[in-house]
Image (cartoon, rainbow, N blue to C red):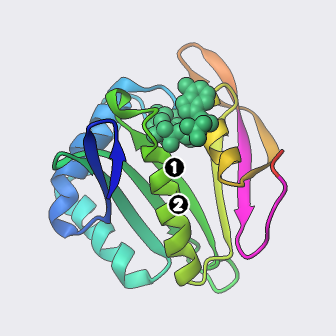
Amino acid sequence: MKETGQEKVRIRRAWEGDAEDLLRLQRRLDRETAFMLLEPGERTTTVRQETEQIRRSFDTGNRTILVAEASGRMVGYLEARGGDYRRNRHTASINMGILQEFVGRGIGTALMSEAERWARQHGIHRLELTVMEHNEAAISLYKKMGFAIEGRRRESLFVEGSFVDELYMAKLLGRQEEHE
Ligand SMILES: CC(C)(COP(=O)(O)OP(=O)(O)OC[C@H]1O[C@@H](n2cnc3c(N)ncnc32)[C@H](O)[C@@H]1OP(=O)(O)O)[C@@H](O)C(=O)NCCC(=O)NCCS
């Protein structure tokens, strides 16, 4: 349990019964922020499919979905998805988002710390992600957590009328990397 201001924030693993709340949270993030992949209305996942995703996250051993709750309300999530094959099982890619009214209170740090703890326990050697190059808050969080910039996907996204570059960032576990 982490204290952020007056609210207690709890980080826990999502279970099947969270599917509806998780979808609602993701849809709200799609409307609130242009820093994630989907535009409002593009998320067509059903509750049944989301339930299946959560179930699969337990079955595969190299996936997890973590949620952050403040006063019992789901306010953020982090998904880590490991590769499907023996050669990339140890590499997990990360997606995360926190509701605007809850950013800047350490919830992102808490979610990422818990993801790293989970990863170390589940044989994950590499955490990776992509981030829009102008997403300063996210890049600061990832650098703080030891992620390094590895490359650039030039004009890979089209956001609000302009092409945007994404940065590849990654962290190898079991090794102290220099912050860039
Ligand atoms: C990016 C995001 C996950 C960060 O989560 P958060 O809960 O706000 O992060 P934290 O409060 O733990 O802050 C982590 C670090 O980020 C940095 N940071 C936070 N807000 C910042 C801002 N507005 N500008 C620059 N740096 C910022 C700080 O270095 C901070 O560490 P510190 O407080 O120890 O100095 C969150 O802002 C978010 O969900 N944004 C919208 C969706 C998104 O961008 N998702 C990521 C897509 S790749």
Q: Give the residue type at disc 2.
A: Ser
- Residue 125 visible? The answer is yes
Q: Give the range drawn in magenta.
A: 166-178
Numbered disc 1: secondary structure: helix
Q: Give the residue type at disc 1.
A: Thr
> Considering depth in this image, is 47 or 12 the residue closer to the camera?
12
Give the residue drawn at x 22%, y 65%.
Answer: 51
**Residue labelled 1 has its Cβ within 8 Å of some atom of ligand 1:** yes
> Considering depth in this image, is 10 or 99 the residue closer to the camera?
10
**Residue that label 2 marks:** 113
Q: In this view, does 89 lie to the left or right of 180?
A: left
Give the residue drawn at x 26%, y 59%.
Answer: 50
Name the mark on residue 16.
Answer: none
Quadrant location of the C terminus in the rendered image: top right
Query: Is residue 173 located in the magenta-colored stretch of the structure?
Result: yes
Q: Where is residue 24 in the image (x, y as percent from the top left)?
A: 21, 42
> Considering depth in this image, is 136 or 71 the residue closer to the camera?
71
> Considering depth in this image, is 51 or 140 the residue closer to the camera?
140
**Residue that label 1 marks:** 109
- Residue 137 visible? The answer is no
Numbered disc 2: secondary structure: helix
Within 10 angstroms of label 2, few (less than 14), some, or many (20 or more) residues? few
Within 10 angstroms of label 1, few (less than 14), some, or many (20 or more) residues? some
Q: Where is residue 144 in the image (x, y as percent from the top left)?
A: 67, 47
Task: Quadrant for residue 125, please give it.
Answer: bottom right
Q: Do the CB atoms of the residues marked 1 and 2 lie less than 8 Å apart?
A: yes
Q: Position of residue 126 (x, y in %)?
A: 69, 69
Task: Quadrant for residue 134, please give it.
Answer: top right
Give the residue drawn at x 42%, y 69%.
Answer: 64
